[in-house]
Amino acid sequence: MFCPKCSAEYRAGFTECADCRVPLVAELAETKRRDRRPDMKFKTVFTTTDPALASVAKSVLEAAGIESFAIDASAFPGGLKSRLQVDADRAAEAEALLEELEE
Ligand SMILES: [Zn+2]
């Protein structure tokens, strides 16, 4: 079980984060996806340790009309990289755009 706010991990049996006072969830990433749009599948198309580059990547996708979601590294326990997710249907298109960005 995880706290959706601070990402702390709890043993089974706990239902609330002791620090944040919010209900725990079984899995962080899945919950975030469900909260956004239940009928959409997302694919991670870009990961980076540089938050500024993540913003640039998001702008590139926006300019192309592709909606993207940035997941900050701090959302994952021990996470080091920010991730950008897009609708799985547009993942190939997004990857092509971001490939140019990386070069
Ligand atoms: Zn918490």
Image: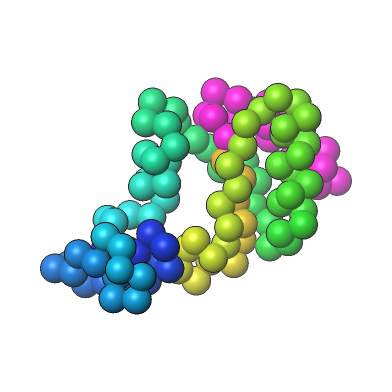
Magenta-drawn segment: 86-103
In this view, the residue in front, 35 or 91, is 35
Instruction: Looking at this view, name the residue that lies furthest to the front.
Output: 21
In which quadrant of the rendered image does the N terminus lie? bottom left
Q: Quadrant of residue 15?
A: bottom left
| Residue at screen point 54% across, 23% down | 89
Percent x, y of residue 72: 58, 58
Instruction: Looking at this view, name the residue that lies furthest to the left.
Output: 13
| Residue at screen point 62% across, 31% down | 67
Q: Please give left or right for residue 78 compared with residue 38 in the image.
A: right
Percent x, y of residue 62: 72, 32
In this view, the residue in front, 19 or 39, is 19
Percent x, y of residue 33: 42, 41
In terms of secondary structure, what is the magenta stretch mainly?
A: helix
Instruction: Looking at this view, name the residue that lies furthest to the bottom.
Output: 19
Percent x, y of residue 93: 68, 26
Rendered position, 59 above or below 75: above
